[in-house]
Structures are given as structure tokens and as C-alpha cells.
Image (cartoon, rainbow, N blue to C red):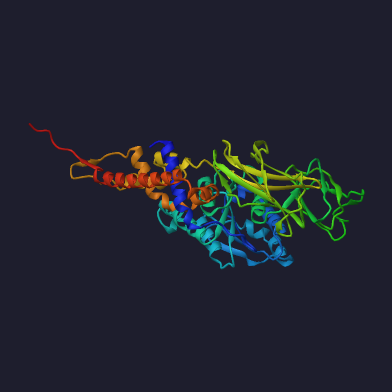
Amino acid sequence: MGRGFAGVLLAGLLWLAAGAGLAQPVEESPDVRVIIDVSGSMRSNDPDQLAASALELLSALLPDGTPAGVWTFGERVDNPLPLGEVDDEWRERAMALRPALVEYQQHTDIEAAVRSAAESPANGWRHLVLLTDGMIDLAPARGAKPEIDLASRRALLDELAPALAQRGVVVHAIAFSDEADLRLVERLSRTTGGLPALVQSPESLLGAFVDIVERIFPADQVPLAEGRFAIEPGVEAFSALLFHAPNGDPLTLVAPDGTRYTPDSPPPGARWQVEPRFDLLRVPDPAPGEWRVEGEIADDSRIGVSGAVSLQLAPLPAVLNPGQTLPLEAWLARGGEPWQEAPEDLAISVTLLDAEEAPRAEVWLARQGERFVGELTVPELSGAARLRFQARGEGIDRLRDLAVNVQPLLSLLDEAEEGRGVGDSRLAPLGERFHEDLATGREGEAVPDSAADRFIDFIHDLPAHAVTLWREGRPWLERRGAAFAGDPRQWAVAGLVVVLLLTLLALRRTRRRRRVVHREEPHV
């Protein structure tokens, strides 16, 4: 089975899945449910209690009125902060949860934690933020190990995750250590349309939480360079999220007129929250002009702005694939509608940055009326990345950063051909049934599976991954859909895919008939 054949087949399956209509709708007030691992390994993997700091940051960033709650899990699942609307009282309760996050337990029941957090009723879409530092590890009293762990993992990935996607539950999963089940984190996020993240250092955990919040509640930013940023006329408020070293010197904010502000004397009407690793400052009705921050701040600090004018983007997936052609669309809106009086010199660029913030691909969008459109081909890279949209014109300079994760789609085929399924190679493979049900005749033996046999079995299992494939291929399909009906070549491709599928089914039936080869004694 050639890789080109596989690519055509996957494209066809994506087309067939398009009717499922699993695109996530625009969310008015989505639920945010945080699930934090409190298994015993967190004692050594999080000695500085970064999980508590991340929760404090999250509570500060969530907009008022957002339904949110906190779950913890180890051997059992607890809900120390039930679902409720975010306000000052909710934030105080979240800040008081630090002791609950160090009540460590034995074992790690990820499936039960996800299931419990997702079951609470919701008015709309639910976003689960899962933080774990390990792998599924159930108590031996529940059955023989590792069989019970593997069964729970399969139930989570092959049954629960697709069901969650159908119900509008998005799981953003963060692996907090090298011992975490990264394959589980990636598959759980991919299937539900969430953002997977591998935290390389404790400090980067805060950034991962910010990336997730910005995907749920997108907001405009303005460029921040060497502590300086410009506020345009018409900006109604700005929020400065300033990361710094633990317990560093206090920061100072300097207004365009030279007025100096500190946490003890903030700007009029402002709220200045000081934490060991970050400052969060909200300033209403800021004076236009150049502002600056005095003090040591990290490069991932950012300045968010709000006002009548905003930069809007068409929906984009959280997971990209190398070689994928990504359709892009952006525009400036005023009062929620495309801004017809946008500057004539307005230009919008899109840059794909890798984990080290190095640009890997860039494209300028073409203006089509009030909107800007284009395509970006994802380069060969893997892991965390960022799509940066920047709109520049007379009197305006806006940014939108969108965290993504780049993963090779055809790695699924590689794993299938190796007989590993799509699970972690460190565990018993999800594809172990390739061999465990082989029949042997009275005097016969099973013929070992060939690569083609394993590929056919993989195709048999693809319906379980239809949601994932659809989410990754939907933007491409939508862009091509308009041209499909009028192009006979497109119908020819669809017909070819159907023929290939029928051929595979026939091969599978033939394979079942020939699986057993009986030996006969030689005779004269």
C-alpha cells in the first residue's frame, strides 16, 4: 500500500465525513472546567506548585460570568470548586484551592476524571483543561494489571473521546512531565478539537494555560517590544499580562505623558494583580500614545486591547499537519460587522512561528472587498507552534496569536503498518488484536499478517477516528466544496475513492478466508 494511495484514501474519507457537521459553533459563554492531577508523582514533578499558580492565572484571565469549575483526581475524583459563574467570590475560592492541590493520592484515573468533569450539565460547549503528569494507573484492587489500565485507556480514547466530540466537549490536554502519556494527550485533544501541549519546563505551564484561554476567548493584542507598546485612539481598555522571575523587583508602568504608576498607585480605575510569577494589569480608558513597562519582563508577556475595532479570524483547527494547505481569512470589524471604512493601506500578514518563536512560514493575505484571504502551507515541523495574524494600516496595528500543535497525520498509517495501532508504543498496542484472534486448524498454523493485512485492519478501525479526521480536514474541504459540483474531475476522484473502499472490503473478506493454512503430510 503506497503512501500516495493512503493519502487519496484519507482525503476521500474526510470528504465522506463532511456531512457529519461537527464544526464547533460560535460560543457565547462556554464552560471552562479544569482537571488537575494530584497523584503522588506531582509531589516531585511540581515541587513549586506551578499547578496552583496556573489555576490562579486562569481565574484571573477568565471573563466575568463564565461558568467554570475545578476537579482534582488521583485514585478518586473530587470537585473542590463546583461549576459556577466567575466573579470576585469565585476567584477568591479558586485562589484558596492551593492546599487541595497537594493532597496527593496514589494512582491516576484519567478516564474517570474526564468523564466526571464532562458529565455536569451545560448550556453550550464545554472546554475541559486537563493537566496530568503521568499515565493511567488504576488501583490493583480493581483488577489485574496492566490489563485494567489498558482497558481504561482504550475506553477513554476509542469510546469516550468521540462521544465527547459529538456532545460539544473539547479537551485541551497538557502533559506536565516526560513520564506523561503524550500519545494519550495528543489523541484526546485531536479527537475533541482541543489543543494538546507538552510542557517542557515548569515555567512554560503558565504559557500553556494562556494559550488555551486565548483559543477559548480570543482577543486582540498590540505589539510589545522592549517593554514599549502603542495604544491607538479609540481603545477602550488594555490588559497587560507581564511574566517575570519569581519575586522579582516591582514593575512600573509609564503613561505617554510620563506619569508613573506602580502596584501601590495604579492608574485611575485600574486593577493591578501581583503574583510571584506574573503581574496582571487592566487599565480602562487609556490615553493614546506610547506606554512602557520598566522592569524585567519575559518575552511571552503580552498586551491585550479592546474597543470598537477588532481583528476577526475564520475558525482554524488546533492541530495542523506538515504539508497541509491551510485556508486563511481575516478582516477588521467595527461593532461586530466588517469595517467598510478600514484604512486603504491596510495589510494583513500571517506567520507560523515554531516553539522558539522563529518564523517558519509567512504569507500576505489578498484583499477581497472587506476581507483578506490566502493559503499557508504548513512546513515540516512538529510540536507546539503559533499562528500570528498582524493587521497594519494607517493608525492601526493589531495582533492575534493562535496556539497550534503540528503533528504528522500519516503517522497514523506508520503506526498501523508497524502493528502498533495509534497508541503509545510503550504500552500494549491498540492494534494487538491483529494477532490475538488468529485461528489455528487442527494441524494448521496462522500466517503472519502482512503490511497489507495490517493496513486493511487499520481501515476497518477508521470510523472510530472519523471525528478527528473531519476536524483536521474540514477547512480544506470547505474551501474545495464550492468547486466540487461543477468539476467532473472531482467526481472522478470521489468515484475512485469509492472503488478503493470496495476493493479494500473485498480484500478483507478474502483475507478472512485465507488466514489459516493447513499443513498436509507429504505422500507418494
43 on left or right of 521: right
Q: Is residue 311 above or below residue 296?
A: below
Q: Quadrant of the N terminus?
A: top left
The residue positioned farthest toward the top in the image shown: 524
Q: Position of residue 248 (x, y in %)?
A: 80, 46
Write the residue at 54% across / 59% down.
113
303 on left or right of 439: right
Q: Position of residue 416 (x, y in %)?
A: 41, 42
Q: Quadrant of the C terminus?
A: top left
Write the residue at 46% across / 50% down.
15
Which of the 4 quarters of the picture holds residue 39?
bottom right
Write the residue at 36% across / 38% down.
451
126 on left or right of 334: left
Q: Position of residue 264 (x, y in %)?
A: 87, 56
Q: Is residue 458 visible?
A: no
Q: Is residue 241 above or below residue 94?
A: above
Q: Is residue 19 visible?
A: yes
The residue positioned farthest toward the left in the image shown: 524
